């Protein structure tokens, strides 16, 4: 069917409908980043179409979807033409994409190195704007029995209760744990409190015969391993 003689011809669509109709007719892979964002926000304003508005937003983040996904509702509302409803829709849409990526990356079932831990947890906490503390619970063969978020903090820290960590370890029948948290600043150097927490959890596990095998500080692109640096 010729595009020119079809009622589905792109030039016959209204500007705000074009991305949606293009997706239906030509498939999702045919859309640009701006057109995908335009579908999320639905409509433009008197001065620009949804696609033009989306192009302007993407220009503000150097056309990087990853940077767009890190913007808060309030930050998105700084763009002229983006109200709270549109901002919430963008945040929700990109968060779904992030979660889908996380599910796809989760292929590690046995830990053989610090890199395995990084590959497992980086998609979950690597690009967050706040700190989260996670624990991997392992059996004698270093297979991951369970992974669990233990606490959520602010931009510079999070509190961890050793009793909670080991309660879950006993519940899952773990013989070893690997602890990890992210540094939103991108600095992977452990702080004094990071070192103190590692020793606290290590000592707490001795009487239970549960070993702290490693502590990873994860950033968006890299990580620091206490085990690799002989700090355990």
Image (cartoon, rainbow, N blue to C red):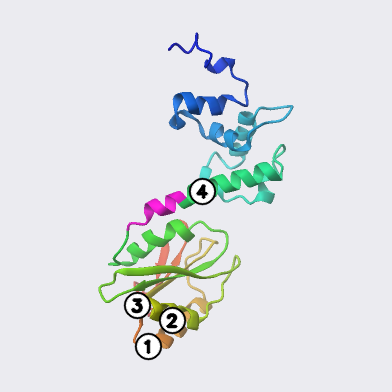
Contact, CB < 8 Å: mark 3 with mark 4?
no
Q: Answer with the quarter of the image where residue 41 lies.
A: top right
Q: Is residue 205 left or right of residue 187?
A: left
Query: Dot 3: within a 10 Å radius of its alpha carbon, few (fewer than 14), some, or many (20 or more) residues?
Result: many
Determine contact: label 3, label 1, CB under 8 Å.
no
The residue positioned farthest toward the top in the image shown: 5
Image quarter of residue 211: bottom left
The magenta segment: 100-107
Whether pointer 2 and pointer 1 mark residues with C-beta atoms closer than 8 Å, the reply is: yes
Residue 184 placement (x, y as % from top left): 54, 61
Q: Position of residue 181 (x, y in %)?
A: 48, 68
SS at badge 2: helix
Circle 1 is placed at which residue position? 208
* 2 or 1: tag closer to the N-terminus: 2
Residue 153 seen in the current view: yes
- Image quadrant where one finds the N terminus: top left
Residue on which the image places disc 4: 96
Say which residue label 3 marks. 174
Q: Residue under circle 2?
A: 166
- Sort mark 2 into few (<14), some (14-19) or many (20+) by Cα contacts within 10 Å: some
What crowding class fits label 1: few (fewer than 14 Cα within 10 Å), some (14-19), or many (20 or more)? few
Q: Earlier in the sequence, mark 1 or mark 4?
A: 4
User: Helix, strand or loop at disc 1?
Assistant: loop
Query: How far from the left and from the top, in percent, is residue 39?
Result: 58, 34
SS of the residue at dot 4? helix
Name which residue lies at 60% across and 65% down.
155
């Amino acid at each position: 069917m010729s595009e020119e003689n079809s009622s589905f011809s792109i030039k016959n669509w209204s500007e705000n409908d074009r991305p949606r109709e293009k997706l239906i007719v030509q498939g999702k892979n045919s859309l640009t980043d701006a057109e995908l964002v335009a579908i999320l926000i639905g409509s433009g304003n008197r001065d620009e179409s949804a696609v033009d508005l989306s192009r302007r937003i993407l220009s503000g983040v150097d056309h990087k979807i990853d940077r767009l996904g890190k913007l808060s509702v309030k930050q998105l509302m700084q763009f002229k033409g983006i109200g709270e409803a549109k901002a919430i829709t963008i945040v929700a849409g990109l968060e779904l994409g992030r979660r889908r990526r996380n599910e796809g990356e989760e292929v590690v079932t046995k830990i053989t190195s610090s890199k395995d831990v990084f590959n497992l947890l980086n998609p979950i906490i690597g690009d967050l704007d706040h700190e989260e503390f996670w624990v991997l619970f392992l059996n004698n063969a270093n297979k991951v029995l369970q992974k669990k978020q233990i606490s959520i903090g602010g931009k510079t820290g999070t509190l961890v209760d050793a009793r909670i960590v080991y309660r879950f370890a006993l519940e899952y029948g773990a013989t070893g744990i690997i602890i990890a948290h992210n540094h939103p600043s991108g600095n992977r150097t452990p702080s004094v409190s990071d070192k103190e927490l590692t020793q606290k959890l290590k000592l707490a596990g001795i009487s239970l015969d549960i070993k702290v095998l490693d502590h990873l500080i994860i950033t968006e692109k890299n990580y620091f391993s206490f085990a690799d640096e002989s700090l355990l």
